[in-house]
Amino acid sequence: MKRSLILISVLSAAAFIFTLVTSVIASSQADDIELVELPLYGDPMKAEGIEMSIDLQMNRHHFWDIKHMPGEDGYTDVDYDHYYLGYSEESTPEPNISIDLFTQGGMSSSHPITREDRMEADGFMLEPAFQMAEEMGPNETRTETVSLADYYEYYPIHIDAYDGMTHGIFDYDEGIQEYFKIPVPAEHLSEYTVETDASGGMTSVNINSVGENDFYLSAVGCVYDDAFYITLSGYGENGNLLDLTQIKGGTGIYRLPYEKSPNRQNIRRGLSGEIEVVFPLDLESCEPIHLVTSPDKSLMYLYAIENGHSVLTVIDTETFEQKQKLDLGEFDWNFNIIQKDDMILLKHYGDDMHIILIKRSEDDVHEVVIDTDLSACEDKIPLDYHTYTAFDYDGERLAVMINQNYWWSCSCYLVVIEDNVPVYAGDYSVNPTENSNNYQYQDRLRYSSGDPDFIGVEIK
């Protein structure tokens, strides 16, 4: 009994010392980073009352939650947490749907690739390679140019669907192939390079399109609890549309019903009903770019290029009738979409840097409230597609926060727009302080990738 009490006392003392040491380490490292503000354009006073937040981590052990408000009455608050054993952040991908058709690319394997691997069902056009390998000897490499129409009547379509829990819902579903019949044109030429191993089996294949022909099939879509919605576009020689006339329901937004899996173990693959077109589209004049839902799922937003203009079509998801169409101007497909409450932010990047803010009313009328050109500060702030964007709008000022898209960077840009023009832009860099053990932070500070809101902005 005494030994047990002594052991418990020793363990309790050790735990206390461990907690004390950890707390000392944590408090000493809480001030190891600092936020440096660098005005780039306009008046910094225009950013007063705007609170920025940045969440950082290092090696899954150290976490900083930084809040900063510019201006004379501004502040910088840093909350720090330390996990001695490490903390693994869960990052769950958003539900999504896409289409795979590999008319160029490559693959290799340590063992022979065979038809039994069912790579065709994943969108790989390997039949020419299989036939080449059958005529080759061991340890041989051969390159041939073929017409894909000699091997395929229709493109092998693979739709990759993820509902937030289960991957590959439509894998190997023959209903997909039967519905989406897209003929392979005779002019689609590809160059195949095949390698065999000592047994004569194919272990490597590379596929490249020949000439100026750029054949591709793309899809955009969104996910509901009982169905995926998807629309296709495909182009071949000289930018001409692929032949989509043999798709059973014509062209438009397709509904692919499925039964949601209750857990990751109970996987149901394949369609749970018939595919149907719920919203017809004329792809001769309409190129779909994005298809997303409103936060409450009652509306569907189709962003498309129509006759050289970027157009937003608002669709009622109960009746699948068009409620509204907005002409957003002469922009190409280089933009991404950020939604917040009843607002939609379109961030156009590339040669024409542009910000468009759309507000939704209670009766579902959408109005463009900000449409501004950022060319005045475009040499200061690159609006790259891959950057994460947060925004807030109070009816007068629009605050847009963009993370710098570099793996070694934990910095952000803040842009303030007022009266439809940019009035301020600043660079906010998070760096190790002079007093910190600088080497341990070098190239190790990262955004908290498990948190989808690792940056944020709010107008107070």
Image (cartoon, rainbow, N blue to C red):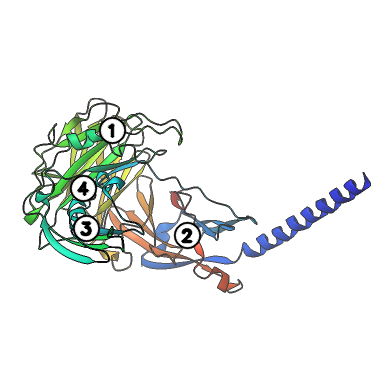
Could you tell whether 84 is left or right of 343 in the image?
right
Q: Which residue is identified by label 1?
A: 299
Residue at the spot of label 3: 133
Q: Would you call the spot at circle 4 few (<14 residues within 10 Å), some (14-19), or many (20 or more)? A: some
Tell me which residue sits at (23%, 63%) in the image. 137
On screen, residue 283 versus residue 64, left or right, reads: left
Q: Nearer the viewer, mark 3 or mark 4?
A: 3
Q: Quadrant of residue 259?
A: top left
Location of residue 351 with respect to 161 vertically, above or below: below
| Residue 38 on image: x %, y % | 43, 68
Where's residue 252, x and y in %?
Answer: 16, 36
Asked whether the viewer can see residue 165, the reply is: yes
Q: Secondary structure at mark 1?
A: strand
Q: Classify 10 Å Cα crowding around label 2: few (below 14), some (14-19), many (20 and above).
A: some
Q: Are marks 2 and 3 in contact (CB under 8 Å)?
A: no
441 or 230: which is nearer to us?
230
Between the residue at mark 3 and the residue at mark 4, the CA separation in whole angstroms equals 30 Å
**412 to the left or right of 357:** right
Q: Amino acid at mark 1?
A: Leu
The amino acid type of the residue labelled 2 equals Pro
Q: Quick one: 192 or 85, which is closer to the camera?
A: 192
Q: CA distance from mark 2 to mark 3?
A: 65 Å
| Label 3 secondary element | helix
From the image, tell me which residue sits under label 4.
Answer: 218
Q: CA distance from mark 1 to mark 2?
A: 37 Å
Closer to the chain start, of discs 4 and 2, is: 2
Which label was assigned to residue 70?
2
